[in-house]
Amino acid sequence: MKFRIERDPLGDVRVPADAYYGAQTRRAVENFPISGLTAPSELIVATVQIKKAAAEANTALGRLPRDVASAIVRAADEVLSGKLRDQFVVDVYQAGAGTSHNMNTNEVLANRAAELLGAKRGLYDRVHQPRRGWRFSRWSGRWSKRRRIWQGGSRTRVARSPMC
């Protein structure tokens, strides 16, 4: 398997070269192997819908360049259509805690958006969540919104989910 090297505040991380997730997701997978289960698609969809809406809103406010926003929206639409679901690799119980799932989502969308803009995966200079992409779409305070979106789509399944 080939790897790329990404850097985060803790140092260098080896990430599979073909992965759309990045360093923080890789660390979460290594540090929190709780159940072997990943986030259900309803949680992924709810999270991506919020990220997409934040990109659109920040573009309308002039806080995000249109080309970057367009790439983020295209990446989000791909995930919403069912693509790249294998890139959401954080354990469901860690995903339920929030931060790791949020970063997994950010990295997948950022890397796919960067790729759509002609950059390589793992290079976050044009599409970087905290500095550019989806201001105000961070995890804190958003769990209840995701939960409501998630439940709206499948109340019965949520009731049986290990997340509840």
Image (tube, rainbow, N blue to C red):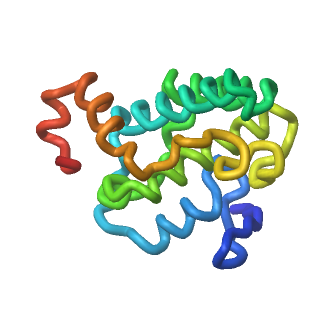
Viewer-proximal residue among 125 and 78: 125
Q: Quadrant of the N terminus?
A: bottom right
Viewer-proximal residue among 134 and 15: 134
Q: Residue furthest front?
A: 61
Viewer-proximal residue among 30 and 61: 61
Counting from the top left corner in percent of width and height, residue 107 is at 62, 49
Q: Is residue 106 left or right of residue 44?
A: right
Counting from the top left corner in percent of width and height, residue 80 is at 50, 25
Residue pictured at 75% horizontal, 54% vertical: 122
Q: Is residue 91 left or right of residue 54?
A: left
Instruction: Answer above or below: position of 26 versus 140.
Output: below
Residue pictured at 23% horizontal, 30% vertical: 151
Q: Tell me which corner region of the image, top left, top right, bottom left or bottom right, holds residue 45.
A: top left
Residue pictured at 39% horizontal, 43% vertical: 142
Residue pictured at 48% horizontal, 32% vertical: 50
Q: Tell me which corner region of the image, top left, top right, bottom left or bottom right, holds residue 153.
A: top left
Q: How many marks?
A: 0
Q: Is residue 90 left or right of residue 164?
A: right
Instruction: Answer above or below: position of 114 versus 138.
Output: above
Q: Residue furthest bottom?
A: 10
Instruction: Answer above or below: position of 78 versus 143.
Output: above
Instruction: Answer above or below: position of 17 versus 11.
Output: above
